[in-house]
Image (cartoon, rainbow, N blue to C red):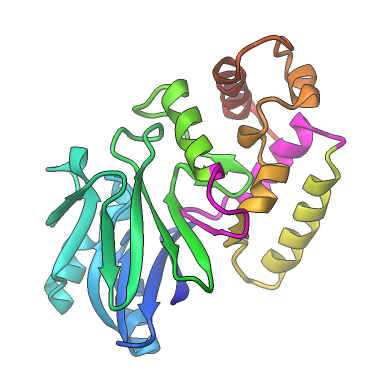
Amino acid sequence: MRVVSIPCLKDNYAYLVVCDQTGEAAVVDVSEAVPVLEAAKREGVKLVAIWSTHHHLDHVGGNEEVVRAVGIREVVGHVSDKGRIPEQTRFVETGDVVTVGSVKARAMHIPGHTLGAVAYFVDDGAQRAVFTGDTLFLAGCGRLFEGTPAQMHASLASLAALPPDTRVFCGHEYTAANLRFAKHAEPSNAQVDIAASAIAIEREAGRPSVPGTLAREIETNPFLRARSAEIRRTLGIPSDADDVTAFAAIRKAKDDFRG
């Protein structure tokens, strides 16, 4: 498996998931068609599937044009997104498997950002990757537009339970800003400083901050660290608050953060 990042719109990413054995590829989240079609041509791959993580326009706005351009045979999304993802032909739930060539991805329903959000987890034995859309960002998570704090907390916990060497491919280039909030929330976390320095080098060189590893997320992402005593002290969360209450307070603090 090979993954190719495709910058789209202002700060979105689409991804080619390439089977090098067959030259076929799926594309995750076609926010706009032209960059995806250009990347497929440049990489010399045949697009055969679209894996949509959720129905928001900045993730599916190019579906129709790509389907018309190359004859995509399968457009995947969660079963609850029927009628909301353009050209959707397959309706998946947790545990369902989608394939491109010899590459297999397991769907994970991860409601919170939207009710139909889904991640795609690939483990080919040599490497692992998860495509999280706008649920898990590097050092952050998506806003709760449709789901509840309990749903989002459970979704993030299911992602955090994947193997720590899993590479996280998320939907937006938000990492530097997310790390500024992480530093505010947990100022003595040295891993946040290390991550911020590494990301600054990548961005100054014009490279994406994505992907990161799940291991680093567990060390630095405040939304995976609701039990941190320092985060609770900094944000005024009672030490005996349950994890969902703490998560909701962290999300509210991030929504209000200006830094």
Residue drawn at x 62%, y 71% as measured from the top left = 207
Total count of labels: 0
145 to 126, vertically: above or below? above
Residue drawn at x 46%, y 73% as measured from the top left = 3
Residue 142 appears anywhere in the view: no
Residue drawn at x 79%, y 18% as measured from the top left = 233
In this view, the residue in front, 64 or 71, is: 71
Residue drawn at x 34%, y 27% as measured from the top left = 146
Residue that lies at the very extreme toward the front in this rendered image: 125
The percent position of residue 210, horizontal first and vertical second, equals 58, 61
In this view, the residue in front, 70 or 216, is: 216
Stretch in magenta: 160-188
- In-image side of 167 versus 150 (left or right): right
Q: Quadrant of the C terminus?
A: top right
The percent position of residue 128, horizontal first and vertical second, equals 51, 64
Residue 187 magenta = yes
In this view, the residue in front, 125 or 117, is: 125
- In-image side of 239 versus 79 (left or right): right
- In-image side of 89 versus 182 (left or right): left
112 to 170, vertically: above or below? above
The percent position of residue 195, horizontal first and vertical second, equals 76, 54
Residue 130 magenta = no
The percent position of residue 60, horizontal first and vertical second, equals 27, 54
In this view, the residue in front, 179 or 160, is: 160
Residue 27 appears anywhere in the view: yes
- In-image side of 162 versus 220 (left or right): left
79 to 23, vertically: above or below? above
Q: Quadrant of the N terminus?
A: bottom left
